[in-house]
Amino acid sequence: MSAASDPDGRHRAGPVETEFLLASGKYVGTARGIGIVIISAFGVLSTPTEALPLAFSLLVGAVVVAAAECVTWVTVVGRYVTFGLTIARAAVICAAQSWTASGAESYHSNEWALNVLTITAITIQWEWRPAVAIPAVFGLLGINVLTAGFGEAVLGGDQVLLVVRVLIECFLARICFRFVLRTTRLTDRLRAEQEALRRQATLAGARRRQEREHLALLHDTVAATLLMAARNKPIADPDELAGYARRDLSVLTGEPGRSSPNGSLVDFTTLLGAVVEQSPLSIESRVECEARLPPGPALALIRALHEALANIDRHAGVRTATLRVTGGECGLVMEVVDTGRGFDPTAVPTHRRGICGSIVERVAAAGGRATVTSQPGAGTLVRLEWADG
């Protein structure tokens, strides 16, 4: 089995490793083919005149195999065919060196055969598993040893050095390949771990937001019921209290931004009056509508208003504010204005949840929109909007 498809026979490659193996299968063979064609061209130039027909035949064969190495790597069958042609090309060039060698090369491996053998032996380490590459290398070495020197001093000192040299080069090539492959696997593993941590953080953040909103809604529901009870005191009718409880339950089990299951609406004006009365600020209130809203949005807007007034009390440096409410049955717009010291909304630390969590996110969760406009020395405007549908 080829390294490009599954180098270990049991490991499923990740995206980085897959890209590396594909690039290795695509470019190593192509580079080898081009290199051997160039070496073969120079080999023809150094071949004795009487052996030129054979040399040109070897060159043509080298070109054909190089073309196959460039195009047949894309399929499994093509890879095996190309591998066979690659080994055959090196074997034939090594076997023919007794005719293509000249001069001092007559009793040694000639440079053409030696370079083709070395390049082939090294590059297949990046394409094939050791079970395939090692027998191929020893086969080529055997052919080279048997054909170099025309049978004289087959295992002479030069041939021993050649065998040792090729084996060391193949070993180093295999080590380099395994190192790069291990690096790609480590990169894939780190990416997977980072993605898992990111998903866990996202899920944890979503759960925290849901818990925070649920607790806030629970608090708002109970607070609003108590406020309505205070505004309409004394409430002695158990049925009316039960009605408030049923409405609270519908808020807690219903969907944000929608009416409760029984279609009940909250008298939003009553809630506003209770908040204004209990605020420590002196509030100029202008309510220009008699709004009745679904419980969820009503309570979210009241809670956001309460937080806006609390921020004025704590940070604005003034004791007065203006509240204006406009709208009708389909929705409303509520604006809270103060003339205090103001601030830069973009400079508020992320851990401060008063604006982001208690106002903006709360109103958005109920299907509305909240904007806070302010600048140092120019006061603050908090605008809360909600529309049915």
Image (cartoon, rainbow, N blue to C red):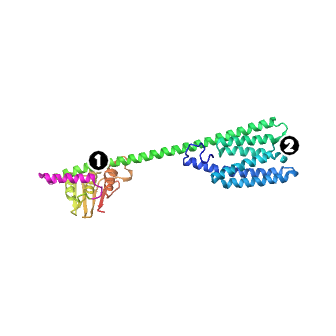
Name the residue tied to disc 1.
Answer: 215
Q: Residues within 10 Å of mark 1 (few under 14, many from 20)?
A: few
Front position in the image: 342 or 366: 366
**Residue 99 is covered by the magenta coloring:** no
Mark 2 residue element: helix
**Residue 243 is covered by the magenta coloring:** yes
From the image, give the main secondary structure of the stretch colored magenta: helix
Name the residue tied to disc 2.
Answer: 106
Q: Tell me which amino acid carries mark 1.
A: Leu
Q: Tell me which amino acid carries mark 2.
A: Ser
Residue 183 place in picture, x, y as percent: 58, 42
User: Number of numbered discs present?
Assistant: 2
The residue positioned 20% from the left and 51% from the top of the image is 245
Q: Is residue 149 left or right of residue 299?
A: right
Front position in the image: 116 or 303: 116
Q: Residues within 10 Å of mark 2 (few under 14, many from 20)?
A: some
The residue positioned 65% from the left and 41% from the top of the image is 131
Earlier in the chain: of badge 2 and badge 1, it is: 2
Q: Is residue 277 visible?
A: no
- Tell me the quarter of the image containing the C terminus: bottom left
Residue 329 place in picture, x, y as percent: 24, 64
Say which mark, if any, is on residue 175: none
Q: Is residue 11 left or right of residue 173?
A: left
Span highlighted in magenta in the image: 230-258
Mark 1 residue element: helix
The residue positioned 63% from the left and 49% from the top of the image is 24
Residue 127 place in picture, x, y as percent: 65, 46
